[in-house]
Image (cartoon, helix red, strand yellow):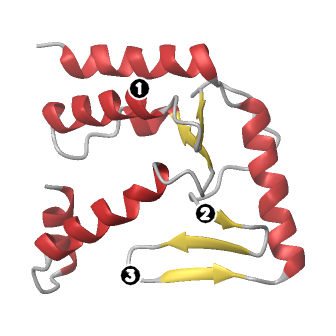
Amino acid sequence: MILRRVVTFLGVPDDVSAGVAKRMERQQVLYDGEHHYDVILGEQALYTNVGGPGVMRGQMERLLRDMDLSSLRLGILPATAEVDVVPMPGFNMYDGRRAHYELVSAAVDVTDPGEVALHERAFDAMSRAASYGDAARGLISKALAFWSEG
């Protein structure tokens, strides 16, 4: 459903089936035991409606199920948390060598060592402010209850 919205919004050829298959394949790295992911989601992401209540419930259930994987460290940055960094768009870090942004129409890679170091500092600041473990589970469960109402 989300990919179909992207195709419609961007007006690109409909390759949703291939896109879904590729994303499902990429998700397997969570279970292969060779990779580790340190993820921080803003609490607001748990409430941003991208597909309706049923899709959002499924997303919350998936987070609750997968947050205990040994390959994943999942933090939730509470909406009211004080953070020692100015808010910025979401980014991915790759082995301390690259920061990657997905924008509306393009992707941007930051590879300058000094810039990558700033991204690491920003991630560390958000990580210090994020909730993990039972506290994160509580925030996700609260969002699940929200999407389950009505």
Helix, strand, or loop for circle 3?
loop
| Discs 2, 1 touching: Cβ within 8 Å | no
Marks 3 and 1 sit apart, C-alpha to C-alpha, by 31 Å
Amino acid type of the residue tagged 3 in the rendering? Ser
Residue 132: x %, y % from top left: 64, 25
Of badges 2 and 1, nearer the viewer stands: 1
Neighbourhood count class around disc 1 (C-alpha, 10 Å): few under 14, some 14–19, many 20 upward: some
Which numbered circle lies on residue 105? 3
Give the amino acid at mark 2: Asn
Work out which residue is located at the far right of the displayed protein and give it. Answer: 114
State how far apart marks 2 and 3 are (Cα).
17 Å
Location of residue 81 in the rendering, given as x and y in whole percent from the top left corner: 68, 26
* Observer able to see residue 135: yes
The relative height of residue 14 versus residue 149 in the rendered view (above or below) is below
> How far across and how far down the image is residue 145, in percent?
29, 13
Label 1 secondary element: helix
